[in-house]
Amino acid sequence: MYNSGKIITGLIIFVGLVTLPFWYSIGKANIKPDPSLNTPVINQMKVKHCIESKQFMIDNHMELLNEWRNAVVRDNKTIYVSTTGQYFTMSLEDTCFHCHSNEKQFCNQCHSYVNIQPYCWECHVKPAEEIANGH
Amino acid sequence: MKLLLAFVIVLVLSAVPYIGIKYAGMSYEFGVIVPYAAVAVFILGFVYRIVKWAKSPVPFRIPTTCGQEKSLPWIKQNKLDNPSGTSGVVGRMALEVLFFRSLFRNTKTELKDGPKLAYGSSGWLWLAAIAFHWSFLIILIRHFRLFSQPVPYLINLLENVDGFLQIGIPTLYITDILLLAAVLYLFIRRIAIPQVRYISLVSDYFPLLLIFGIGLTGVLMRYFYRVNVIGVKELVMGLIALKPAVPADIGSLFFIHLFLISTLFAYFPFSKLMHMGGVFLSPTRNLANNNRMVRHINPWNYPVHVHTYAEYEDEFRDKMKSVGLPVEKE
């Protein structure tokens, strides 16, 4: 092999970069997200339900919130009719956080696990719990 | 025909994991065994190809000289285009690897009315190539958010810059659009220009279509048909911690994406995609033009046995003296 010094150095750097995720994960605990429904309002509910089905909310909550924002801000529509025919106020703070008042144990669980950085808080204030704790 | 074959191969490669997951329940095979095998083939194959290349001697310097060579002190040398030392070579290689400088110099010859022969710069290929390669790199680095816990700050920064248009939810990434557009351009170029089409092989179409398939499944997963991204990260983190486990209900679209990427990884060392490693070994770029300044000895020169006059005299001194021949050393 010619120029083996340079080539072996290059190959070591290459293999190091390719296997970087393996090295980076050593000694780090892999804590899986566990969104908590343990809030006073949810605990008082006899039948625990969100405004739509659980699966729909998991898949589409971000799009729903985006539609709500556009409807409220641009079209002055503030009432959401769910698929079950119930009426809800389109409001992150009054509707969502009324029940899910635990942002850290609920929203952030999954968001920080897969590194999603929603820009909700550029306009909205955080739920009361967070403010009370001085965050 | 070649195009059709490449297209059918990519379609079959997409159908295999779909059928395997949906009807045969082979999520462990496609979620664990295939990715591990692909990464192993990629690394070993890559190292093998580079070592094989490194075994070829480069008997003489063949840098392409695109500027004034180092000469008399009052003649200005073009240090990047005709480097005579390491720093010039490093600069030239950096421009080549990061910005595809030689591709930027691509020219086009046209016969115009007159008849006149016209030469002009042709930058579209360079533009598409640079958009494609950089987007691909940024997308690859962005995927590190699924490979690390906690996610490094640099990844956050990259995501924010990439998604800074804040269009839609989830935020549209600029590189997603750029990658698909650039691959589409490179593909259309290949079939639309007759000369390029004539020299195109299955191994030219296949990587383009494969990468387009990877980009398309990625975009579909992010913006249209949701997969369980929490499950995806659990799978990936299990893989890199060497404790593989496949969470349920990830979604078959993810397995198509993963299988196409595994194919790309396994195919990489045996294909033209090895230009990733090969670009560093191009003798026309990575050699300094010091042909006359330094003596370059042919690496395969056989060691020639020489018998110098001094040795000759040592051997025959007595005999030479006895017949009266003059000797240098008494």
Image: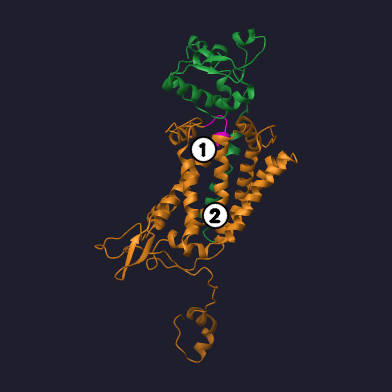
Identify the secondary structure beneath mark 1.
helix
The reply to whether the magenta stretch includes residue B201 is no
Q: Amino acid at mark 2?
A: Leu
Query: Mark 1 — on which chain does it sit?
Result: B
The image quarter containing residue A109 is top right
Figure colour of chain B:
orange
Measuring from the top left, give residue A7's x and y in whole percent.
53, 55
Q: Which residue is mark 1?
A: B142
Query: Which stretch did the figure color magenta?
Result: B142-151
Name the spot of residue B127 as percent of width and height, x first: 41, 51
The residue that label 2 is drawn on is B273
Q: Position of residue B157 (x, y in %)?
A: 45, 33
- Compared to residue A81, the image places residue A22 above or below, namely below
Q: Could you say which chain is coloured green in the image?
A: A
The type of residue carrying mark 1 is Arg
Labels 2 and 1 touching (C-beta < 8 A): no
B105, A66: nearer the viewer: A66
Report crowding for label 2: few under 14, some 14 to 19, many 20 or more residues within 10 A (C-alpha).
some
Letter of the chain that mark 2 sits on in the rendering: B
Q: Please, is residue B32 above or below residue B287 in the view?
A: above
- Please, which residue is most extreme toward the left here? B74
